[in-house]
Image: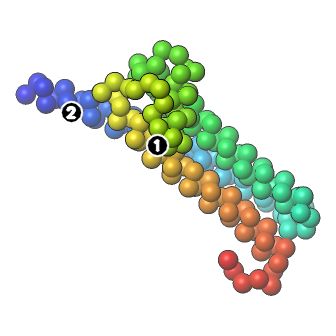
Amino acid sequence: MAASSTHEVELALPLMVSLVMFLATIVIHAIALVGIVSVIRHHHRLKRTGVWFWWDVTIVSVAIVLAGAAHLVEVFIWAVVFVLCGQFGQLSAAFYSSAMLYTSLGTGDVAMSSSWKLLGPFETADGMMAFAVSTAIVISVGQSMVRKKFPDLPSL
């Protein structure tokens, strides 16, 4: 009976940590989205959107940079979790491994212990979802520019 309860703990704790990280990612991306919407609204009020190509490039670039910053923060937080779970002794190695997992490139050079390796697939899923949200945000920004510049076009 003791062996099965140990196995349950090894599964339950990584799952709980992964859930907390998913929630943290949602909050971080929500903050980035609020920032992006604020930038768009500011430039829209100043009548800069859809008027001049280089303003539009700047606005889309700001959206991409804010989304990218959110991803970097998320990779860093995952790396801190890896260190706190005892999987890495140095934050730099944890950050590298986290970036590899988050971007779905693979596990990196270091494999985690059997009790914590479940974090890997969850970070990859988290990163894929976060990139999907970022892509949707940037496409939405681009669509708003096109709608403003070409109001006669049907809705995309």
Disc 2: CA contacts within 10 A as few (<14), some (14-19) or many (>=20): few
**Which amino acid type is marked by label 1?**
Thr
At 45% from the left edge and 47% from the top edge, which residue is drawn?
125
Q: Tell me the element at label 2.
A: helix
In percent of width and height, residue 121 lies at: 40, 41
**Which amino acid type is marked by label 2?**
Glu
Residue 8 numbered mark, or none: 2
- Compared to residue 67, the image places residue 92 above or below, namely above
Image side of residue 15 versus residue 101, left or right: left
Q: Residue at the left extreme?
A: 1
* Tag count: 2
At 77% from the left edge and 74% from the top edge, which residue is drawn?
147
In percent of width and height, residue 134 lies at: 62, 53
At 85% from the left edge and 64% from the top edge, which residue is drawn?
49
Q: Colour scheme in the image?
A: rainbow
Q: Tell me the element at label 1.
A: helix
Image side of residue 35 versus residue 8, left or right: right
In percent of width and height, residue 53 lies at: 89, 63
In this figure, which residue is indicated by the disc labeled 1? 124
In percent of width and height, residue 100 lies at: 52, 35
Residue in front for this viewpoint, 101 or 62: 101
Residue 77, quarter of the rendered image = top right
